[in-house]
Structures are given as C-alpha cells and as structure tokens.
Amino acid sequence: MKNKPQLPPTALVIFGAAGDLTWRKLIPALYDLFLDDLLPDKFAIFGVDGKAITIEDWRMRLEDGVKQFSRHQDADSGKWKEFAVHLIDCLTGDFKKSDTF
C-alpha cells in the first residue's frame, strides 16, 4: 500500500450547509475521501446557512445523506462518528451581508 502523503491541516467552509447540494453531494464525497484515507489527518468542516440549525441536527441530516448517497453504500456508525467530529459547527448567516463572511 502506498504511503499517505503528508497533507497540511485544512479547514473547509461550506456555504448552504443545510442545503440539498451539501446533503447529496459534498458531504457524501468528503466522507468517501475520509474512508479512502485521502483527507488530511487534521481537518475541520464548518457550515454556514441562512437558517439556524443545531450542530446535532446538522450532523444527523448529513449522516442521512451519506447513508443514501455515499459510494460506500452506507455510513458505518463507527466511521461516521470518526468523521462527524470534524463537522465543527453550522453557523447562521445572511449571504447578502458582509458580516457573515
């Protein structure tokens, strides 16, 4: 097996974090990369959405998307928990206001 390249710590911000694109595509793809050991050891994913959502509800919604759309077919509960700790927070913001950014 190839050695994993040393990737720098990374932070991702997803705008529209509670939306359909994030639920169907972005998080399932990031979860797949996580399972394939292609993400840095240290990474954080932050979400920003126009509607308030708790971190618990956000993680549950995203897990549901992974279960339906991951190419690995299902979210292994242990692996999902390892991944979900990298889902740091989902902040509320108005995309039309510069304070959000």
Image (tube, grey):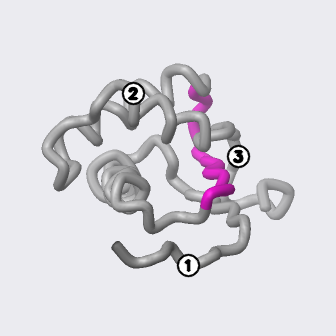
Q: Amino acid at mark 3?
A: Gly
* Residue 80 percent location from the top left of the image: 40, 34
- Residue 57 versus residue 100: which sits nearer the camera? 57
What residue sits 22% from the left and 50% below the top? Answer: 70
- Up-down relation of residue 70 to residue 61 (above or below): below
- Image check: 81 left or right of 53? left
Say if the magenta span includes residue 65: no
What residue sits 32% from the left and 48% below the top? Answer: 20
Labels 2 and 1 touching (C-beta < 8 A)? no
Q: Report, in whole angstroms, how far the alpha carbon at label 3 lies from the one at label 1.
A: 35 Å
User: Which dot marks residue 5?
Assistant: 1
Q: Report, in whole angstroms, how far the alpha carbon at label 3 lies from the one at label 2.
A: 31 Å
Question: Which residue carries the number 3 mark?
Answer: 93
In the displayed orientation, state which residue is furthest to the right: 99
Q: Earlier in the sequence, mark 2 or mark 1?
A: 1
User: Which dot marks residue 78?
Assistant: 2
Query: Which is more foreground, mark 3 or mark 2?
Result: 2
Q: Amino acid at mark 2?
A: Gly
Magenta region: which residues?
41-53
Q: Earlier in the sequence, mark 3 or mark 2?
A: 2
* Residue 13 percent location from the top left of the image: 63, 59
